[in-house]
Each structure stands twice: as structure tokens, then as C-alpha cells.
């Protein structure tokens, strides 16, 4: 998949960089000040595709980004090994890290397209963090 323009904010793993605090820190320096007050020494990020996966939060290249390059795909869902252990959700950090929604995001992109995903990315993240799980109905937002 050819990624250009605003689409470049959709990471290979399904995370939408435009909703990431490190990306938002480009326009809001208070985000960095808050992070530094919490002990994180980080820089703003223009999006993982722009920096070839060299994430300022981990001070290294993202292994998932490198993996998609090795496999010659733009998104994990295009890989013959999808889904793999790198995308396995974990409860650790789920309350603040959007990594547990990567599989959903990737399936959404594959099914509805990148443009539709970008239109819905903020809503999807809101439903993840603020939705109340209703058995038989899924996460609902008041």
C-alpha cells in the first residue's frame, strides 16, 4: 500500500500517530513538560513513518516497523504472518497505551480502507478508553 500525505500518520502496526501524545506535542509543548515532570525524557515525534520507526519513546527503531520493512509490506495486515505475536494484546499498560487496539485498527483499515480509518481513528480511540463494555453489545460511549 502506498502511503503519502496525511496517510503517513497511520503506522504499519495500526496505531494512528495523529492521536499519539508525542505527535500532539509538536503543537502543544505542555505535553512534553508533563512527560518530563513524570520522568520521561522524550521529544516530539512527526509520526513513525517519517522517522522510519525510530520512536522517541523507546529511543530505538520499533521492531514492528522493522519487521514490516523486512516483509516488504506497508501494514501488518498485508503480511502473510498476520497476526503475529508482535500484535498480541497485553493488559500491561492498556489503560494508557493504545496497543491493544492495533488488531482492530488493522482489520478496519483492511476492510474499510485507510481514508475511512483516518476519519474514524479518534472515535475508535475514544471508544477504547472511554467506552463501557456491554455484554453482547461491545464497548459503548455515553
Image (cartoon, grey):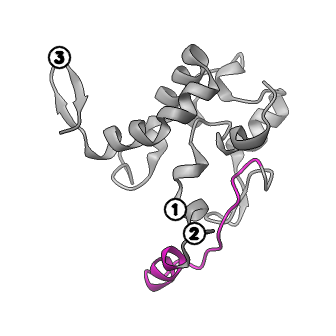
Residue 42: give x, y in percent of width and height.
Answer: 61, 74
Using residue 142 as the reference point, say whether residue 6 is left or right of it: right
Residue 11: give x, y in percent of width and height.
Answer: 66, 41
The residues bearing labels 2 and 3 have C-alpha atoms spaced at a distance of: 38 Å
Number of marks in picture:
3
Residue range corresponding to the magenta coloring? 30-49
Residue 138: quarter of image: top left
Residue 115: quarter of image: top right
Residue, disc 1: 21
The residue depicted at 57 percent of the width and 35 percent of the height is 118
Upstream in sequence: badge 2 or badge 3:
2
Using residue 78 as the reference point, say whether residue 130 is left or right of it: left
The residues bearing labels 3 and 1 have C-alpha atoms spaced at a distance of: 32 Å
Residue, disc 3: 136
- Observer-nearest residue: 31 or 78? 31
Which class describes the residues within 10 Å of circle 3: few (<14), some (14-19), or many (20+)? few
Q: State whether residue 89 appears in this view.
A: no
Which class describes the residues within 10 Å of circle 1: few (<14), some (14-19), or many (20+)? some
Magenta segment includes 37: yes
Upstream in sequence: badge 3 or badge 1:
1
Our reading of the magenta stretch's main secondary structure is loop
User: Is disc 1 placed on a helix, strand or loop?
Assistant: helix
Residue 65: give x, y in percent of width and height.
Answer: 73, 42
Residue, disc 2: 25
The residue depicted at 63 percent of the width and 27 percent of the height is 114
Magenta segment includes 11: no
Are the two marked residues, 2 and 1, in contact with CB atoms closer than 8 angstroms? yes
Amino acid at each position: 500500500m502506498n502511503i503519502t500525505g496525511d496517510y503517513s500518520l497511520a503506522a504499519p502496526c495500526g496505531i494512528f500517530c495523529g492521536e499519539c501524545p508525542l505527535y500532539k506535542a509538536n503543537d502543544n509543548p505542555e505535553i512534553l513538560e508533563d512527560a518530563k515532570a513524570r520522568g520521561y525524557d522524550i521529544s516530539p515525534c512527526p509520526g513513525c513513518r517519517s522517522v522510519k520507526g525510530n520512536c522517541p519513546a523507546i529511543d530505538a527503531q520499533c521492531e514492528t516497523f522493522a519487521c514490516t520493512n523486512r516483509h516488504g509490506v506497508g501494514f501488518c495486515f498485508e503480511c502473510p504472518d498476520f497476526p503475529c505475536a508482535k500484535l498480541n494484546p497485553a493488559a500491561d499498560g492498556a489503560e494508557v497505551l493504545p496497543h491493544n487496539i492495533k488488531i482492530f485498527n488493522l482489520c478496519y483499515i483492511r476492510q474499510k480502507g485507510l481514508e475511512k480509518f483516518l476519519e474514524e481513528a479518534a472515535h475508535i480511540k475514544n471508544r477504547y478508553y472511554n467506552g463501557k463494555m456491554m455484554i453482547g453489545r461491545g464497548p459503548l460511549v455515553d
